[in-house]
Image (spheres, helix red, strand yellow):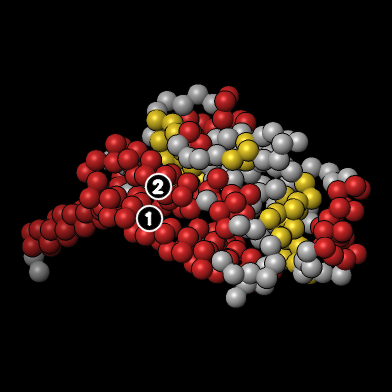
Amino acid sequence: MTGTKKTALIIILFVVAGFVFFGMNTSKTKVTMQETDKPLVGVTTFALGDIVQHIAQGSVQIVHILPFGVEPHDFEPTPKLMGQIEKSALVIYNGAGLEPWIHTASFKNSVVNMSQYVTLRKVASTENLTDPHYWLDFANMKKATDVITKRLIALLPQHEKLYRKNEKLYLQMLDNLDKKYRNTLGSCQKDTIIVNHNAFSYLANKYNFHVAYLSGLSPDAEPNAKKIIELIEMIKEHNVSTLFFEDFASDKAIKSIAHTAKVQVDVLKPLGNITADEANANLSYEAMMLINLQKLSKALSCH
C-alpha cells in the first residue's frame, strides 16, 4: 500500500471513529436530557405518592419528601431536601397538621394542600384535633385522585389522555378495595381492635368497628398507667385476640400489655409511610390495604 493510500485510510478511520464517538455521546446526552426534563413532583405521604405514580406513569420525577422507613409525624426535612422541594414544579402535601414544617417553606410553583379537598374527621373530644389519616378512607382517596389528575394535566397537558385513562383504572381499584372491605368486614363476630396509635378512625367509621388505642394521634406519646389498665380490661371484655402496633413507633408498651393479657401482637399499617424493604418490593397502596384487610378480618373473626 502506498503512502498516499495509507494516509487516506487513516483519515477515513478517524472520520468514522469520530461519527461513532459523537453519535454515542449524543445518544447518552439525549437519555440524560429526557430524564432531567421530567418535572419534579414532591409528595409527603406514601398514599399521595402512590396516586401520582399510577396516574403519571413515569412522566414525572417523584420526590418522596418523607424518606421510606421514617415516621411521618415528627419528620423534619433537611435544608438540601427543602431546596429540592421548593423548586419542584408541583408539591402535594397531606395537610391536617401532619407536616408542621410545611409552613416555613417558600414554594416557587404549584402547591396542593390535599386536606382541603377531602372529608376530615375529628378525633375523640378529649383531644379535639383533626385526624390527618384520611387516606385510609377510599372515598377520600378518590377525591385526592381527582385533584392530582387535574394538577398533572395542568402541568403536562400533552399527557391528558394517558392521565385520564390511568385515573379511571385507579378509581376502579379503589372501588374494588371498598367492595372487598365491605364484604369481608360486613359479618364479624368481634367489633373492637386495639392499636398503639390512633390512626384508624377513618377505617373504623367506614366499616363499623371500634378502635381502642394506647396513645393518641402521636405514636410517640407516653401511655399512662390508667390507660394501660383500661386496655387490659377491654381485652377481656371484648375477647380481643390480637393487639396491633406499627413499624415506626415503639412497640414495648403494646407488647408488654399483650404479654400480661396473654394475646398476640401484629403489625397494622397506617400507611403514612412504608418501610424501605416494602418500597424496594414495589408494594402499592392496594397491596398494603389488602394485607391490612386480612389482618383485620382475622382479628375481628370475620366470615
In the picture, the disc for residue 145 is 2
Residue under the image location 87 percent in, 59 percent down: 233
In the picture, the disc for residue 38 is none
Question: What is the quadrant of residue 220 in the picture?
Answer: top right
188 or 115: nearer the viewer? 188
Residue under the image location 75 percent in, 51 percent down: 213
Q: Circle 2 sits in a helix, a strand or a loop, which is it?
A: helix
Does the rendering let one see residue 269? yes
Residue 251: x %, y % from top left: 79, 57
The residue under label 2 is which amino acid type? Answer: Thr
Q: Quadrant of the N terminus?
A: bottom left
Q: Circle 1 sits in a helix, a strand or a loop, which is it?
A: helix
- The mark tally for this picture is 2
Query: Going by the image, does 293 lie left or right of 40?
Result: right
Q: Residues within 10 Å of mark 1 (few under 14, many from 20)?
A: some
The residue under label 1 is which amino acid type? Answer: Leu
Mark 1 and mark 2 residues within 8 Å of each other at the beta carbon: yes
Query: Going by the image, does 26 lie left or right of 92?
Result: left
In the picture, the disc for residue 171 is 1
Does the rendering let one see residue 49? no
Report, in whole angstroms, how far the alpha carbon at label 1 lies from the one at label 2.
8 Å
235 or 279: nearer the viewer? 235
Question: What is the quadrant of residue 265 in the picture?
Answer: bottom right
Lower sequence index among marks 1 and 2: 2
Query: Going by the image, does 282 lie left or right of 217?
Result: left
Above or below residue 251? Residue 119 is above
Above or below residue 296? Residue 205 is above
Residue under the image location 69 percent in, 62 percent down: 191
Query: Going by the image, does 174 lie left or right of 19?
Result: right
10 or 153: nearer the viewer? 153
Residue under the image location 86 percent in, 53 percent down: 230
Residue 179: x %, y % from top left: 46, 64
